[in-house]
Amino acid sequence: MQNMRNFKIVITTTQFLSKHYQELGFFDFIFVDDVDAILKASKNVDKLLHLLGFRYDFKTKSWTGKARGCLMVSTATAKKGKKAELFRQLLNFDIGSSRITVRNVEDVAVNDESAEMIAAILKKLGTGGIIYARTAEEAEKIYESLKDDFRIGIVTATKKGDYEKFVEGEIDHLVGTAHYYGTLVRGLDLPERIRFAVFVGCPAFRVTIDDIDSLSPQMVKLLAYLYRNVDELEKLLPVVEKHVDEVREILKKVMGKEKPQAKDVVVREGEVIFPDLRTYIQGSGRTSRLFAGGLTKGASFLMEDDAELLSAFIERAKLYDIEFKRIDEVDFERLSRELDESRDRYRRRQEFDLIKPALFIVESPTKARQISRFFGKPSVKVLDGAVVYEIPMQKYVLMVTASIGHVVDLITNRGFHGVLVNGKFVPVYASIKRCRDCSYQFTEERENCPKCGSENIDNSKSRIDALRKLAHDAEFVIVGTDPDTEGEKIAWDLKNLLSGCGAVKRAEFHEVTRRAILEALESLRDVDENLVKAQVVRRIEDRWIGFVLSQKLWERFANRNLSAGRAQTPVLGWIISRFQESREKKKIAIVRDLDLVLEHDEEEFDLTIELVEEKEELRTPLPPYTTESLLSDANRILKFSVKQTMQIAQELFENGLITYHRTDSTRVSDVGQRIAKEYLGDDFVGRDWGEGGAHECIRPTRHLQEMTFRGLFRKVCW
């Protein structure tokens, strides 16, 4: 056998690798087609790491060295073992599957599934249609009704010959079944040929009373959640897994009698019908495929005779930001032209650059994870402790990560509390350090905690270095921090710190929803330095006023946990002043019959009452919530503290349930008005609040039934 160290490319099996890896040299690039086979034997992982340049130290029982090349793996099942953790530790990536749900599809709902309607759609849009039926029998009927007027084929478990004819262009349309693992739902990737999809019948799955005993525990839990208005089930919701048999018996009793208040499922006597959005998204996604020049446009028609099921399907689709049109709203001429134009672009894809990577930085890990999942199931990698979610989109391969708030702050041991004063004011910034043992935060350059002396310090320098590496690889950075002065300052800091690694732009969004993120990515802007200056001054005020006053409190009360901020201090003065006023005694007279309280120093006096004016007033609802009114009501009604309210609001915002919660605007956007109208129906009366602009009130980002919201809240609590 020739010396394999002379080869630059080696294609090998796991068996060959096991026998001959010592004869192989180092490689700059290793591709493993089936990493699951490698992971079955832990020694194979060791051999891969050796080929990359790592060595195992038996004394320290750890791996040493540095990767000399790059490892790429492919997996079908994404099953992880203990050895897979080495990929994260040494090569900064996790093994896992990803799923892309980015789509450019015009969705149309039709309350008619007749053969005449199907034929009308095919005639208007021309070639390239996939028709999905509920069953193979229905697919046969549709095929028979259309075959005389259209060049059409059929694909079932026993008939697959027409598939190749469709690929070659010998027939114009295919009929098959809408099953998630079916050939036409998952097995097609023909961006040029497939232009539109027609679903004859809503994809759905049905559960009857007879099915309950055979349901999986997860499905039992879903049904229990649906019937959560039943007291017996509500009590068991947090522990369904431990009481599955008991829950099954309760469900058998209630399924034929109780009807839960849910708009996105259909409940009939002894039966529950769930819209199958997963199959619909997968099948309609055949019409819209990602390529080097962007994303092909597609159309999808959902035809259903059952108006109640169609309504439930449309309602469930809103959770995925899928909005359906009525068929009378469709401009077929425009739609057909757009379908053709995007496929013409696909044919010329060699002329376009590949979709470029973009590093998208937000403030919190929760928000990073939430945003990445809007567009599918992301792949995950870890770089020096920074978790990065990677997901392809129409314009970018988006790498979403978090700065975890501010990365720099005013230093404390230079100038006057971090500001050099010498004819000019020069703020001096340093990385933020946090003690992992006592949670104390500081900025001065030192190796140990000034409070407890611990050397277990988390320094934001490591995050900055990780972000610089990611920015250098991506060459384009989008900063999506919160839309306020503090978020603008973080964006400005990141722009300066990542200078030289690539272009940096700002994305502004006021709610964490798929629609808002897409709109923000389409309207990128530069950092607003006026907002940055406002935040710089505000932070200096914190130091010069609040920090100095806090030190006086520490000295006076011998307690370093006390603080006095630039806002808290004057508010405290106002409270003291009002308290002193309240201590002043005054004589009052109370007229109980008239519910009057009068200032008067006489024990008896005459009181004359005259009717001055009589009028009727129309009381309108209070304006939408701002931060101030939210904090006030949360304290008055729920007895929540400011900290507790803002923490809950932050979690709701990051999970995409409310708009940004730091606002003084009462404006309701058109989207907010539409959400309210969908929820209130005929009771909706639109009102204009506040002035126009980017900022908005605090409002829900989607309409949720009370019980649905309670379920989401309980899920978060669990």
Image (cartoon, rainbow, N blue to C red):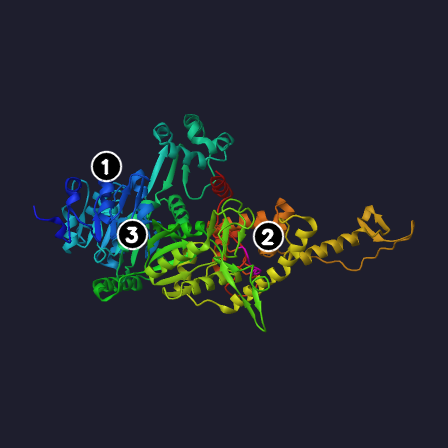
Amino acid tagged 3: Gly
Query: Going by the image, does 505 lie left or right of 349?
Result: right
Residue 12: give x, y in percent of width and height: 15, 45
Please say whether residue 664 is one of the residues in the magenta stretch. Answer: yes
* Circle on res. 642: none
Pick the front one: 403 or 338:
403
Residue at the location (82% across, 46% down)?
Answer: 593
Secondary structure under badge 2? helix
User: Which residue is pictured at 51% across the width and 41% down the height?
Assistant: 710
Rendered location of residue 282, percent (x, y): 30, 48
Taking the magenta stretch, the answer to whether it contains residue 656 is: no
Mark 3 — residue? 285
Foreground mark, 2 or 3, reads 2
Q: Which residue is mark 1?
A: 41
The residue shown at (77%, 60%) is 613
Q: Position of residue 210 (x, y in %)?
A: 35, 28
What crowding class fits label 3: few (fewer than 14 Cα within 10 Å), some (14-19), or many (20 or more)? many
The vertical placement of 680 against 468, above or below, is above
Disc 1 marks a residue whose amino acid type is Ala
Q: CA distance from mark 1 to mark 3?
A: 37 Å
Q: CA distance from mark 2 to mark 3?
A: 41 Å
Q: Which residue is mark 2?
A: 630
Number of numbered labels in the structure image: 3
Tell me: residue 595, above or below residue 60: below
Q: Which residues are magenta?
A: 661-666
Measured along the vertical axis of the image, is residue 442 above or below residue 279?
A: below
Marks 2 and 1 sit apart, C-alpha to C-alpha, by: 57 Å
The secondary structure type at the circle numbered 1 is: loop
Viewer-nearest of discs 1 and 3: 1
Residue type (three-letter) at the residue carrying disc 2? Leu
Q: Nearer the viewer, residue 289 or 371?
A: 371
Q: On the rendered structure, is 366 left or right of 121?
A: right
